[in-house]
Image (cartoon, rainbow, N blue to C red):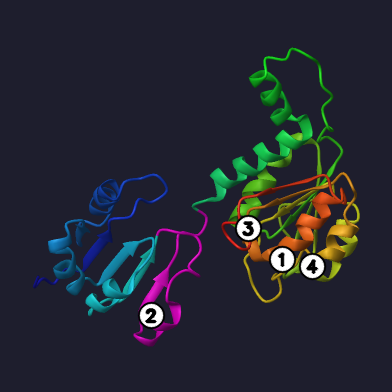
Amino acid sequence: MQTNRPNIVVLDHDAHGIPASDYVETLRSRLPDHNVMLAEAPGDKRRLLADADVLAGRHLDTDEFEAAENLRLFAANTAGVDHLPLETLAERGIAVTNASGVHGPNIAEHVLGWTLMFARRLDEGRRRQARREWRRFQSFTELAGSTVTVVGLGSIGEAIVQRLSGFNVQTIGVRHSPLKNGPTDKVVGYDDLLDTLARTDVLILACPLTDMTQSLIGDGELATLPTDAIIINVARGGVVDTPALVEALQSNIIHGAALDVTDPEPL
């Protein structure tokens, strides 16, 4: 396709529940000076990829990468990009962008739902309903007055803190650079994590997986948490030492855990 207008090819991957075809129409309306095409039919896909300046999608396999000879940018529709062949893309000088922040609202609501489930024992209510039992049961706790620690104050962490603002809780944020402050009542660095865990009722992990955060929560950290503490992990599975967590749950060292991610995945 010979044209002076940049060619954007959208791979046939849904983006957060939005069909790729709808994504194409949105891009066309916002980028009228670009050719925006959907690589849907197998017969057309290789031809479109060969002329693509920009590829948009969730992942990029080897055949697609090799076919996209003129590629200058891969626009991932995911927040994380560790599943992409980043070194190979860099070797060809191909830039990579992500959809940072796109998950903030929905994951924050997910975290809030889990927190309330533990506090009010909503899961027990559902179980009794399924058994057609009409008996009182005691809730676990109230959020008001508790301390919620959020590790990672990126877009997801900030969205979580924002939604906790109406629950009369004390919030502590843990981040690599505490001098940047944040939306929590207090911000500390990773060096102060253990002291913070000792007074944490709800620990929410929303940080990236780095050398610093690999197995961030292990035996020592779990033992430091109060026995009625809960952990919610919406970061990466590797942030938590899985065998240590399993042992802590089986030994009642902590009250419970809600895992959006695990290591290995699936368990």
Indicate the position of residue 202 as horizontal and vertical percent values. Answer: 79, 47
* Marked residue nearer the N-terminal end (2 or 1): 2
Q: How crowded is the residue under tag 2: few (<14 C-alpha within 10 Å), some, or many (20+)?
A: some
Q: Which residue is mark 4?
A: 189
Indicate the position of residue 159 as horizontal and vertical percent values. Answer: 62, 48
Amino acid type assigned to the residue bearing label 2 in the image: Leu
* Marked residue nearer the N-terminal end (4 or 3): 4
* Marked residue nearer the N-terminal end (1 or 3): 1
Which mark, residue 262?
Answer: 3
Amino acid type assigned to the residue bearing label 3 in the image: Thr
Which mark, residue 180?
Answer: 1
What is the CA distance from the residue labelled 4 to the residue labelled 1? Answer: 10 Å
Amino acid type assigned to the residue bearing label 1 in the image: Lys
Q: Which residue is mark 2?
A: 89
Q: Name the front one of labels 4 and 1.
A: 4
Extent of the magenta region: 77-101
Q: Is residue 101 left or right of residue 198?
A: left
Q: Is residue 255 left or right of residue 23?
A: right
What is the CA distance from the residue labelled 2 to the residue labelled 4? Answer: 33 Å
For the residue pair 204 and 218, the one nearer the viewer reads as 218
Farthest residue to the bottom: give it.
91
Q: Does 113 appear above or below 265?
A: above
**What is the magenta segment's predominant secondary structure?**
loop
Q: Secondary structure at mark 2?
A: helix
Q: Does 43 appear above or below 90?
A: above
Q: Is residue 143 left or right of residue 2?
A: right
Amino acid type assigned to the residue bearing label 4 in the image: Gly
